[in-house]
Image: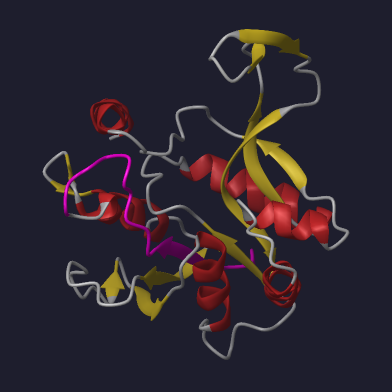
Amino acid sequence: MSAVLWCVVPAAGRGTRVGGSIPKQYLPLAGRPLILHTLERLALHPRIAGLMVVLGEGDTHWPGIDDLYGKPVRTTIGGAERCDSVLAGVRALPADVAEDTFVLVHDAARPCVREADITRLMDAGMPAGGGLLGAPLRDTLKRAGNEGRSEVTEPRDHRWRAFTPQMFRRAELSAALHAAHAAGITVSDEAMAMERAGFAPLLVEGAEDNIKVTTATDFALAEFLLSRMT
């Protein structure tokens, strides 16, 4: 039988680039909160056992969901940075999630992730000791100067865009995130923490429409993409 994994969903951020008083993850997307689309897509995956949603302190917008499609939904309180929230979520997972069990981490603002890509990550990442979805960089890459002028064309060979989910063993991820925190380093994703700890996460190519909704314009694009997936 294929392994079933818990997924940590950090949702403690404010999403300030969108603007407004409501955190980005609760803004409407196709008539429902963005985060609900993400959680439903994860819960529908047959190999995801449950969801651990990490909320901000004093979050008054969380709808109090405790079950989606027969999968348990649990919550805990996160920290100031995304990496702090992920660590809190990993530590709050149920006791029966063993230390050597793989866990997923997925952005609350990525509602368009494909079931096939999650499966591909699990199938390829587990034998490799952990990995993440991403896509090779295909655009020409420029480095800008202080005045916003293009100064250098950077090589794009071996460069990838990092997506989520990312998947690592519970104890190893917890230790890597804790070590980065202790060193005063704010890691931008789980793979960065694991790289610092000496691991080389496997990059698993996924669909490039697994976008992270960051700006107001992204909501229209995500709505279009979701309409094509259902």
Residue 159 % position (x, y) = 74, 27
Relative vertical location of residue 119 with respect to residue 49 in this rendering, above or below: above
Relative vertical location of residue 101 with respect to residue 113 in this rendering, above or below: below
User: Is residue 9 located in the magenta-colored stretch of the structure?
Assistant: yes
Residue 194 % position (x, y) = 76, 59
- The quarter of the image holding the N terminus is bottom right
User: Is residue 53 located in the magenta-colored stretch of the structure?
Assistant: no
Please give the name of the residue rendered at 16% of the width and 53% of the height, measured from the top-left corner. 21
Please indicate whether residue 17 sits to the left or right of residue 139 in the image. Answer: left
The quadrant holding residue 130 is: bottom right
Please give the name of the residue rendered at 37% of the width and 64% of the height, measured from the top-left corner. 12
Q: Residue furthest right?
A: 198
Relative vertical location of residue 4 with respect to residue 131 in this rendering, above or below: below
Please give the name of the residue rendered at 63% of the width and 17% of the height, measured from the top-left corner. 145
Mark yes or no: residue 6 visible: no
The quadrant holding residue 167 is: bottom right
- The quarter of the image holding the C terminus is top left
Q: Nearer the viewer, residue 21 or 24?
A: 21
Q: Nearer the viewer, residue 57 or 183?
A: 183
The quadrant holding residue 177 is: bottom right
Provide the major secondary structure of the magenta segment: loop
Q: Residue furthest left?
A: 31
Residue 109 % position (x, y) = 37, 47
Mark yes or no: residue 20 visible: yes
Residue stretch rendered in magenta on the structure:
1-21
Q: Residue furthest bottom?
A: 95
